[in-house]
Amino acid sequence: MMNNVFRIAVLVFGLTLFMSTSSFGQSENRDERKEPPTFKELLEKMDTNEDGKLSKEEVKGPLKDDFAKVDADEDGFITEEELKKAPKPKGRKRD
């Protein structure tokens, strides 16, 4: 009798532990993902000479790394139209 009570207690404890750890997975709410900044937001943060365009010297981060891909007319500046038509960055690869 005592052996059965012990087995049930261990089973309940194990199931409780399993259920509590499985709830820490990835969020199902996709709205939590951050949207990319708009051109206006990029201008406010990076357009130091306030000419309405972004030069390679002004941009930072991934945009600087992909500057040549975004600057379609190769004039040395990124305009709002070029940013809209730019190829979307690929997601990170999962291991």
Image (cartoon, rainbow, N blue to C red):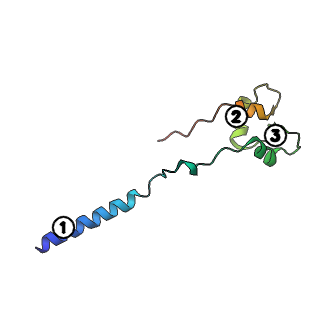
Q: Please state the horizontal and vertical placement of residue 4, each as a whole percent of the image.
A: 14, 69
Say which label, 1 or 2, has the lower sequence index: 1
Q: Quadrant of residue 7?
A: bottom left
Rounded to the nearest angstrom, the CA distance separating label 1 from label 2 is 60 Å
Q: Secondary structure at mark 2?
A: loop
Task: Specify the quadrant that holds the N terminus.
Answer: bottom left
Say what amino acid the circle numbered 2 marks: Asp
Q: Amino acid at mark 1?
A: Arg
Residue at screen point 66% across, 31% down: 87
Q: Which residue is mark 2?
A: 66
Q: Which residue is mark 3?
A: 57
The numbered mark at residue 7 is 1
Kindly identify the residue that appears in the image at 44 percent across and 54 percent down.
25
Pick the residue in front: 80 or 18.
80
Nearest to the eye among marks 1 and 2: give it. Answer: 1
The residue under label 3 is which amino acid type?
A: Glu
Is residue 47 in sight in this rendering?
yes
